[in-house]
């Protein structure tokens, strides 16, 4: 991709500029983030700069020429990430070592949809055909010119559904930055799409750390992040059940198909860190199935292996929900279609409220004692 002087990019788009955001400063003493937006004042078009310093925000109104000079002298080449939004499109830029910027993502600004004709209105997806989303190209969902590959439309729809579930949780949010941990990220491109959604679509300062057990997968994913210019995304080789993990504030934890009790350790970590949002799609819930014996009203579900297995999986996720609710989360269960083999799974979506309790865990422990099973999250959150 062509490398660019950011001052020239903004100068060319000044008449239609609706938003600009500079983030991740090279100098630790610089403003953490600077946002620019146009405004009308006494019939004149000005630009307001909002400088973020800690919990404080400082504002300054300047004319267009003054804005360009300020960008050239104070901002261009001094911030690792920049987002530009015009009336027609949005684009993200990452600073390179030579002081120029690489355009790493772009999207057309949605226009109001025409009035619906009967029931034939086309669904408007968050990731639109024509957006420069490199992960969708590498996945084979988009062609090189960002058109949907017809044979991969189901995957395109599933990825958008995942983002819709996240978008619903952030409806009305004015958060400007976010730190996300992705457990058991594997070689899936979903982590890259998640970064694109928050950084480009929402214009936020984003830090994502993906954890996986396979060192070669981690190495490959770090190389892809560098190729895309995603400076806020990195991958780490670690085991969530025993290794020391990120020890600062965490806003969101994602765990998609972390196998069996790895999901429990990830949820335990999220609870201990007070993560605001949790999105978990568990799999391979073997623990209860392997330890449960007959003991009461549920015995009818234990007679046939396939029914026992499914009931144990549902019981596992039900207990996880009870523990999360006791630990201060509002939880809902959502049917979620997998990206690869398309079985229907459950997603546990949780939002922190701070309202804690004990009744859920007490109910779960009573079941565990009666049927002789163990459940890792219940034990971790005793």
Image (cartoon, rainbow, N blue to C red):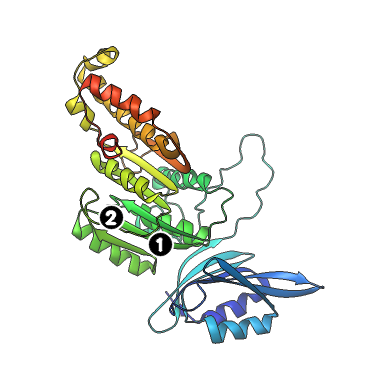
Q: As rendered, which of 171 and 56 lies closer to the eye?
A: 56
Classify the position of the C terminus by image quarter: top left
Q: Could you tell me if residue 329 is visible in this image?
A: yes
Mark 2 crowd level (few <14, some 14–19, many ≥20, 10 Å Cα): many
- Give the numbered dot on residue 361: none
Q: Is residue 4 above or below residue 35?
A: below
Q: Is residue 44 above or below residue 99?
A: above
Residue drawn at x 21%, y 54% is 243
Distance (Cα) linking label 2 and label 1: 13 Å
Residue 56, image x, y percentages: 57, 68
Residue 310, image x, y percentages: 28, 25
Residue 63, image x, y percentages: 70, 80
Mark 1 crowd level (few <14, some 14–19, many ≥20, 10 Å Cα): many
Q: As rendered, which of 331 and 117 lies closer to the eye?
A: 331
Q: Quadrant of residue 207?
A: bottom left
Helix, strand or loop for disc 1: strand
Please say if the residues under marks 2 and 1 sit with CB atoms less than 8 Å apart: no
The residue that disc 2 covers is 211
Q: Could you tell me if residue 136 is visible in this image?
A: no
Q: As rendered, which of 290 and 155 lies closer to the eye?
A: 290
Q: As rendered, which of 90 and 83 lies closer to the eye?
A: 83
The residue that disc 1 covers is 207
């Amino acid at each position: 991709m062509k490398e660019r002087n950011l001052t020239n990019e903004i100068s060319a788009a000044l008449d239609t500029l609706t938003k600009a955001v500079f983030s991740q400063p090279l100098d630790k003493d610089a403003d953490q983030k600077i946002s620019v937006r146009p405004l009308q004042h006494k019939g004149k078009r000005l630009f307001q700069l909002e400088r973020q310093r800690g919990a404080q925000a400082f504002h300054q109104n300047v004319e267009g020429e003054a804005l360009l000079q300020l960008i050239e002298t104070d901002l261009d080449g001094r911030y690792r990430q920049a987002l530009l939004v015009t009336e027609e499109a949005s684009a993200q830029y990452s600073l390179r070592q030579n002081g120029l910027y690489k355009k790493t993502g772009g999207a057309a600004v949605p226009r109001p949809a025409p009035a619906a004709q009967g029931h034939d209105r086309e669904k408007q997806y968050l990731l639109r055909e024509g957006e420069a989303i490199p992960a969708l190209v590498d996945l084979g969902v988009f062609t090189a010119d960002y058109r949907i590959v017809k044979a991969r439309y189901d995957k395109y729809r599933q990825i958008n559904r995942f983002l819709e579930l996240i978008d619903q949780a952030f409806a009305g949010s004015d958060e400007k930055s976010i730190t996300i941990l992705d457990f058991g990220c594997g070689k899936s491109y979903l982590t890259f799409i998640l970064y694109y959604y928050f950084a480009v679509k929402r214009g936020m300062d984003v830090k994502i750390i993906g954890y996986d057990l396979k060192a070669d997968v981690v190495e490959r994913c770090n190389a892809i992040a560098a190729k895309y210019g995603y400076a806020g995304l990195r991958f780490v080789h670690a085991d969530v059940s025993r290794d020391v993990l990120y020890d600062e504030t965490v806003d969101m934890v994602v765990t998609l198909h972390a196998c069996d009790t790895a999901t429990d350790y990830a949820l335990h970590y999220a609870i201990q860190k007070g993560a605001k949002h949790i999105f978990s799609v568990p799999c391979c819930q073997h623990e209860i199935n392997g330890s449960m014996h007959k003991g009461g009203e549920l015995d009818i579900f234990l007679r046939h292996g396939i029914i026992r297995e499914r009931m144990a999986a549902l019981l596992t996720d039900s207990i996880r929900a009870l523990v999360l609710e006791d630990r201060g989360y509002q939880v809902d269960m959502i049917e979620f279609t997998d990206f690869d083999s398309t079985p229907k799974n459950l997603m546990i979506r949780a939002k922190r409220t701070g309202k804690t309790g004990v009744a859920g865990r007490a109910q779960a422990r009573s079941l565990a004692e009666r049927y002789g099973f163990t459940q890792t999250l219940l034990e971790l959150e005793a």
